[in-house]
Image: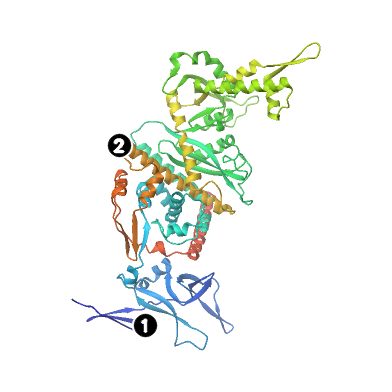
Amino acid sequence: MLFSFIFMCYTSNIIYVTMVTHMAVIEKPVLPPLKAVLSGKNYHICTFKNEWIDGKCVPIKGSTKTVGKIIGGPTGLINWTDEFLKEHQDLEQFDAFRIVDEKAKKGKLKKYKIDYKPADPLITLTQATTLKRLNAGATWVFDNIIAGSPFAIALHRTFSKYYRDKKLLSIAYYMYLEQSGVMYDYYNFSQKTRLPWGGKFSITRLFQSITEDEINRFILTLSNLVQDEEEKSDKKENIYYALDSTSISTYSKYLPLAHRGFNKDHDNLKQDNVLFLVDQSRFMPVYYKNYDGDIPDVSTVSFVLKEFLRLGLNRKAIIVSDRGYSSICNIHRFFQSDIRFLLNLKTGLTVCKHYISSVYSTLTNTENYKPEINSYVYTSVVTWSYPVNYATNCEKRVPHERKPMYVHIYLNTDIKHEQDMRDITYLATLLSKVNSGLELTSEEIKLKDKFIITDEDELGNKSYRINNQAQAEILITNGIRILVSDDVSDAMEADRAYRERNTVEECFKIFKQDAGGRRHYSSNHDAAHGKTFVTFLATSIASMFRAYIEKCKFMGHKIPASCDREMIRELNRIEQTVFKLGAYYGPITGKRLNLLQSLDIPLPEAEPYNAKANKLDDFEFAEEVKDIKETLRAEEQVMGELLE
């Protein structure tokens, strides 16, 4: 057995390392003047410059720069910044410690110096007994699913500076896996879970650093990449984007977008709204927008269409919306913007009542019955006249253009019978209360004026009866759905596309329940705005995961789990063991192996240790945010000069 012995001795500038008969000479790094500065609870190593003024040595303003942090207090291991390590690469060969200089010590006054020890490339017994085990299966699967996707590429291109893409991805994983929008437990989660970025950082500052310009660039990049994929695809089917919005409640009094409005969670709280466009075939959100909580859905269409054109979203896509977004003006806007649409119209609109009455007798013919959807179906083509949106010198009337529009009318007799009996019963009960002289509610008084006729004889006696015409106008719309489109001519395809619009509701369910986006937990606008974006990212990841599972099922793979949550619980039993020089995975067998195989996910391999992901702390990240904002301000200034 051969033993090697290491002897070390120190001089003022040189460290001698002797192994058996070989001696290597390693010179100490030559560094600029350094000092320790207390910031909060931590000590940081900073460079500085002094100058003599009036016989006094004074520090030069603005010359101080943070280059490292002391781990554990005023003395201890120094964790250098990446930038300083690049400038002094010889530091990588050493572990640097700030220690008390006993020789220079004068009484109670302590003096300090930096001591260097060669970095040991071998794992020690202490390191071997302080291994960290992480839940790794779920995030390994997520990494593989999103790798190379438009989502991952857009995130990296937009947020790669200071590794913010990895940090944002880590928080998005946390939100989905923990089903939480509360950030205080993220650190504990990161200590037991394999993440793209495992180190500490300020989540609030990260949220605050996300600018509106970056969000726009992310959405634009994502859209362009998705369109490139669609153009390369052999599929010639229509592309449908589902449009809808939901509310986010808040207790805060300071969020500028928070107002009283129609709260879709029925909370008695202020809210802001978030609007989604979801690619129905991919089950993936492609656009979102945060806006004021008191703006009704129907008023958002004009803005969405402008955003659609400004961001260059897919002009081949057909926007599918529910009745909350339908109005005559909004149909005009779609035609004016030349953006394709499939809208569910409110049957109470005068134009819809006209469509129904004109085709009702034909609609109920047997040949128009479609058993696959249990409805009568009839399609007509109308000429839609809309005002042109360009400047003109007209004196009397704005010029109009005309284009064909497909009107698809569906009648479900089961729904109609149920709604008819409900309305007839309600009106009969109302008539009985009127005849009995009972007190009516404010809502019943309004209905009485509309649906009940009062007759009076010569003696002044009053009697009441139902207004059959008004009742017929209501009953004729029961069980009816009207879809209109500038492009979709086939009623069955229109029905399928509208039913698949449910994907946006599923995304909102993920956004609120699975990613913890139901409520704001911040009173700072920038932080809340940034967190909403990260919740959108978490929703996208969860949607891609579920879509990937459905794709595997479609391909005939037998998935040994009933839902995504059961799958995540099982995958998290796969452990990754992390030590100083790398990481390896435990044995993967049984159900966990079957899961990975059914998903076509490769078995994880050993990974190198990511020192950078365990280095940055809150103070250093504050410097990062400062640099980010200065860079963005410089870029905006350059763009402004170019535009001028």
As drawn, the residue found furthest toward the left would be: 1
Q: Amino acid at mark 1?
A: Asn
The residue that label 1 is drawn on is 13
Name the quarter where the N terminus is drawn: bottom left
The residue that appears at 53% across and 39% down in the rendered structure is 245
Which circle's residue, 2 or 1, is located before the other in the chain? Answer: 1
> Does residue 469 sit above or below 251 in this rendering?
above
Q: Position of residue 284 (x, y in %)?
A: 43, 41
For mark 2, what is the residue?
556
**Residue 459 as seen in the image, left or right of residue 84:** right
Q: In the rendered view, tell whether residue 416 sits above or below residue 554.
A: above
Callouts 2 and 1 close, C-beta under 8 Å: no
How many residues crowd around disc 1 within 10 Å: few (fewer than 14), some, or many (20 or more)?
A: few
Residue at mark 2 to residue at mark 1: CA–CA distance: 69 Å
Asked if residue 515 lies left or right of residue 589, the reply is right
Quarter of the image holding residue 125?
bottom left
Residue 455 visible somewhere in the drawing: yes
Q: Nearer the viewer, mark 2 or mark 1?
A: 2
Q: Is residue 515 above or below residue 441?
A: below
- Percent x, y for residue 466? 67, 17
